[in-house]
Image (cartoon, grey):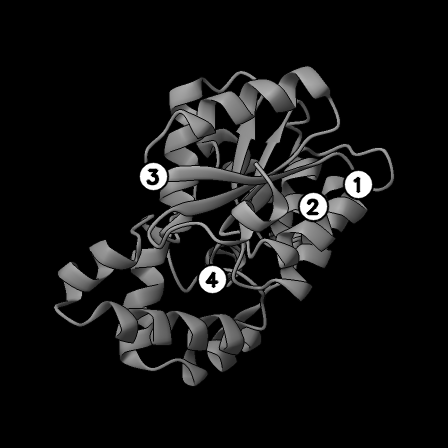
Amino acid sequence: MSDVERSKMADGMLRVLLVESHPLLASALATIVEGQSDLRVCGIARTGAEAVADARLYEADVVVIDFQLPDMSGPAAAAAIHDRTPTATIVFHSAEESETALLDAIDAGAIAFLTRSATAEEVLEAIRRASLGEVLIPARLFAKALARQRTAQSNEEERRLRTSMLTTRELEVLKLMGDGLDTSSMSKHLGIASHTIEWHVRHVIEKLGVHSKLQAVIAAARLGLIQVAKP
């Protein structure tokens, strides 16, 4: 596929950028994605620098990125992509699955985290669901990340401040985010339009001082604004 073809994909197709330094794995992922009627590989980047440039050039909807790249870490590349192409959704697909790796991925703006043991069906499902804004990380890793972010001292003052900043509707949306609902599901649950949900989500993220829905959920759980079920 030429660069021109990649940049002129039909409406409704999710543009997927694969960031993988291992040729065989990159080829396997590309084959899986290209076999779907609603997905297209808009590019395959081997390095972090290529990924940052390609995500913007091809207007990628979803970026599937490895944790370890030849020139920089996956989280560093993901953070740069998030800054330059904020509409791109970040999905990590990595052999690294420690809580430290997960926290780094979250800080970089990732919304999904897949291990190498994920099946082809799980990879495709993650791409589709993440593109809708749904948070997808293993419950075990989420629990570890949440525990690590808890502070020993009371955050009651910060909790009161954050609570006072959020409207009743924003708190409702935040709780549904914690339950793992995507935009469409929240819209049906609250009986309001999807674009209104997205507006509330943006305000929640801004008021909590974070950069993604996943970071908002973890920050809210840490402050006691919402309860996250343990796996």
Q: Disc 4 to disc 2, how far (Cα)?
A: 18 Å
Which numbered disc, 4 or 2, marks the residue closer to the eye?
2
Amino acid type, label 1: Ser
Q: Earlier in the sequence, mark 1 or mark 2?
A: 1
Question: According to the image, label 3 marks what residue?
Answer: 38
Q: Disc 3 to disc 2, how far (Cα)?
A: 30 Å
> Which secondary structure, mark 3?
loop
Where residue 182 appears, x then y in whole percent? 31, 53
Amino acid type, label 4: Ala
Q: Residue at x 48, y 46 (%)?
A: 15
Q: Disc 3 to disc 1, how far (Cα)?
A: 30 Å
Look at the image and tell me whether residue 212 can be seen.
Answer: yes
For the N terminus, which image quadrant? top right
Q: Earlier in the sequence, mark 3 or mark 1?
A: 3
Q: Disc 4 to disc 1, how far (Cα)?
A: 27 Å
Which numbered disc, 4 or 1, marks the residue closer to the eye?
1
Q: Residue at x 24, y 67 (%)?
A: 194
Question: According to the image, label 2 marks what residue?
Answer: 104
Q: Earlier in the sequence, mark 4 or mark 3?
A: 3
Question: According to the image, label 1 marks what residue?
Answer: 73
Which numbered disc, 4 or 3, marks the residue closer to the eye?
3
**Quick check: marks 1 and 2 in contact, CB under 8 Å?**
yes
Name the one closer to the observer, 112 or 33. Answer: 33
> Which secondary structure, mark 4?
helix
Amino acid type, label 2: Asp
